[in-house]
Amino acid sequence: MLNVEIKGAPGADRIALGFSEWARTLKDFKPAFQDVRHIFNRHQKLHFASDGASTGKPWPSNWEPAVPWLPPDFKPRFYPSWKKATVGHTKTLRFTGKLEAAATGGQGALKSETPTYMEMGVNEARVPYASDHHFGRKVSSQLFRREVQLKKRPVVRFNGSVLGTSGSAFDKQGRTSFGFAVRQVFQAHIVRARRLSFGFDTDAADATIARLRNTDTK
């Protein structure tokens, strides 16, 4: 059995895939990892754009405490108003954009790979507060000058099932589980490598990979 492992952070969610020995036709899974990373980044962009709703329970809304060091007559005194006045929006987990960028494949993302292992998600050495939001921890806040209890808002969340759902693996919105899409991508790359080794065309495998790269996942 050939084992392939994918880790997502924060949370260290994992997908472990096992393939029969004939899968060794594909010596290096990095080309498949490139497609998985594309699917994951697409998955994460939808996750952030929907405030978590595309992957499960939506993130809790912003709270309304007053920023303590602002005077009572200062109009954007409450946090959402202050945030909008400061950065021009009230989007959750997107104050500076650094966390969203790291979680969607941009600056600060995990990009480690070997032929049979890859990492995706947030490099917490670059964005150390990702886990605080992900797990809903209590943190010391310079803004509020006290400890605050963060709301739990999963930064990375995906359905890791590689089997899909009963019946069709796709729902009425054309989505599938992230894990199922990953499994299908690997299978397509393995089939592609075998067909190439026998001098056959790879059109069907290429079409499957292209379709999965453009599928919304949950």
Image (spheres, helix red, strand yellow):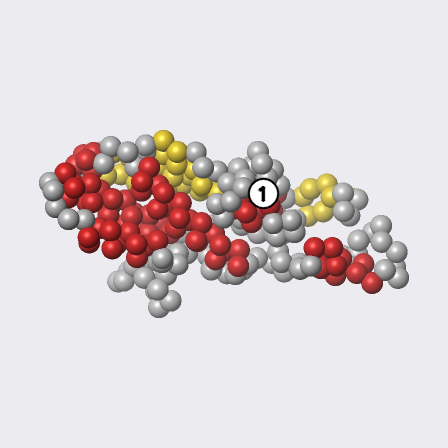
Please name the residue shown 60% across and 45% down the image: 98
Number of marks in picture: 1
Residue 40 placed where, x, y %?
A: 42, 49
Residue 150 horizontal side relative to residue 35, left or right: right
Please name the residue shown 19% across and 52% down the image: 203
Residue 5 placed where, x, y %?
A: 35, 37
The amino acid at mark 1 is: Ala
Is residue 111 visible in this depiction of the protein? yes
Is residue 160 visible in this depiction of the protein? no
Residue in front for this viewpoint, 15 or 182? 182
Q: In which quarter of the image is the N terminus?
A: top left
State which quadrant residue 21 falls in.
top left
- Which residue is farthest bottom? 172
Q: Height in image: 65 above or below 160?
A: below
Residue 29 placed where, x, y %?
A: 30, 37
Please name the residue shown 30% across and 54% down the image: 210
State which quadrant residue 61 falls in.
bottom right
Please name the residue shown 59% across and 39% down the image: 127
Q: Quadrant of the C terminus?
A: bottom left
Residue 148 horizontal side relative to residue 13, left or right: right
Residue in front for this viewpoint, 186 or 170? 186
Residue 144 placed where, x, y %?
A: 77, 48
Q: Height in image: 113 above or below 73?
A: above
Q: Height in image: 66 above or below 121?
A: below
Helix, strand or loop at mark 1: helix
Instruction: Residue under label 1, please give it.
Output: 130
Residue 71 horizontal side relative to residue 133, left or right: right
The 10 Å Cα crowd at callout 1, few under 14, some 14 to 19, many 20 or more, is: many
